[in-house]
Image (spheres, rainbow, N blue to C red):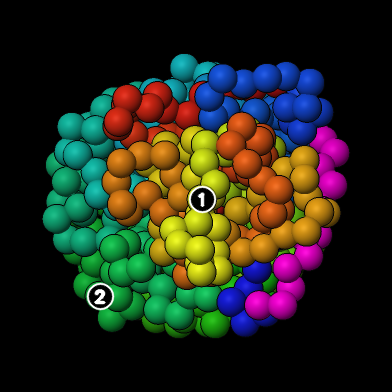
Amino acid sequence: MTMKATDPGAFRAQTPVLCDRASDFIARNTFGRPTLVLDLDRVGVQYDALKAGLGAADVHYAVKANPDPRIIAALVAKGSHFDCASRPELELCLAQGARVDQLSFGNTIKRGSDIAYAASVGVTLFAADAPEELEKIAANAPCARVYLRVIVENSQADWPLSRKFGAAAGHIPALLRQGRALGLQMVGLSFHVGSQTRKAAFWGPVLDQIVQVWDTAQRSGYGLNLLNIGGGFPAFYGEAVDAPTHYAANVMRQVHARFGDVKVIAEPGRGMVAEAGHIVAEVLLVARKSPLDLHRWVYLDIGKFSGLAETMDEAIRYEFITAKDGMASGPCILAGPSCDSADVLYEKTPVNLPNALCAGDRVIIRNCGAYTTTYASIGFNGFPPLDVVVI
Ligand SMILES: *Cc1c(COP(=O)(O)O)cnc(C)c1O
């Protein structure tokens, strides 16, 4: 339902029809505050769909996307593995029944004592992208198997992961040499194509980069045998994306064309859980700033600091569904309820919403199962964090 800036005439709302367990539950219940309703069965369906396309690759669910223990338990039951970023995430997965050999410690920025904890419980697979990190791993987990994260230069993702993670291709040979000298098993490479990479075809140029680094290492005799292709599997936010099995199979074809029969790990986060849940929110206020204002301002009871952090830079554009969809509509600037002027969700590209929308109306924000519940501030302005109902 979002209106493109380039398409100012398109003010007729298209009503997406929501028919799934989560929206049925929402329709039958009332909620006193913004709530994510998440359908656990849907997570299982999504796991199966991704796994069908990924074939022999191990699926390491990126726990940060949604660390609800019930999701972890459901994925343990499916046989999923897990990518953890911290000691609490490792403990969470172990508490829900994951085996240590199903866990990877994939954050490249780890506390030494957390590495020691991971090693003490039997986790062996670690990520690194810098000399100091290799030293920390060697000191705290001498038996570690390590993969090096390579920086991705040309992401076409909606939510690129920037240059914060990874080492430049040119640094990889020195890191491999150092890791080996420290006695670590240097087993492979990882990368992240960027979150919400909508098309499998966008992976090609990134894989081309990584295979060059890989081949250089193999020519130097490192015998790498593990390729961690990270996440990036997309969710539907209104713009077309490939279906998960088709998408994953396409990615794997591109991987095998370049890397042959290598062992692959994939780390879907968003693609696993986003479509399993919707947020129920409420309109608190609709206003125009002046009589000439073309846009209405629509203030919701949820904002950037209470679960919708991914609206930062308007990178992720959620779909909004109201009972008045289909009636005459127009462009709105959407904002959250907090007293922070940065709490504006969509302004550069306004959102098309019904003209009749008013305070008290329910708004369903579609496919919000990923990167919402734990992206909420604790009581800023007195607003509680996003509530969660798992069905
Ligand atoms: C966040 C993250 C993921 C998950 O990314 P999605 O785009 O949500 O699939 C996978 N791997 C690593 C290392 C991550 O940090």
Please tell me which residue lies in front, 42 or 311: 311
| Up-down relation of residue 259 to residue 266 (above or below) | below
Q: Residue at x 51, y 50 (%)?
A: 287
Q: Is residue 219 left or right of residue 265?
A: left
Which numbered disc, 2 or 1, marks the residue closer to the eye? 1
Q: Is residue 19 magenta?
A: yes
Q: Which residues are magenta?
A: 8-20
Please tell me which residue lies in front, 85 or 133: 85
Q: CA distance from mark 2 to mark 1?
A: 54 Å
Please tell me which residue lies in front, 359 or 386: 359
Query: Which quadrant of the rendered structure holds the C terminus?
Result: top right
Upstream in the sequence, badge 2 or badge 1? Answer: 2
Instruction: Please rate how many residues cluster around mark 1, counting C-alpha atoms within 10 Å: few if below 14, some from 14 to 19, many from 20.
Output: some
Q: Secondary structure at mark 2?
A: helix
Q: Residue at x 14, y 55 (%)?
A: 132
Q: Is residue 279 in view from this perspective?
A: no
Q: Residue at x 29, y 63 (%)?
A: 164
Quarter of the image for residue 374 reads top left
Instruction: Please rate how many residues cluster around mark 2, counting C-alpha atoms within 10 Å: few if below 14, some from 14 to 19, many from 20.
Output: some
Q: Is residue 73 left or right of residue 253?
A: left
- The residue at the far front in this view is 291
Q: How many marks?
A: 2
Q: Residue 146's x, y, as percent?
A: 35, 52
Q: Secondary structure at mark 1?
A: strand
Residue labelled with disc 1 = 287
Quarter of the image for residue 384 reads top left
Q: Amino acid at mark 1?
A: Ala
Q: Amino acid at mark 2?
A: His
Q: Residue at x 21, y 61 (%)?
A: 130
Residue labelled with disc 2 = 171
Query: Which quadrant of the rendered structure holds the N terminus?
Result: bottom right
Q: Residue 376's x, y, as percent?
A: 39, 36
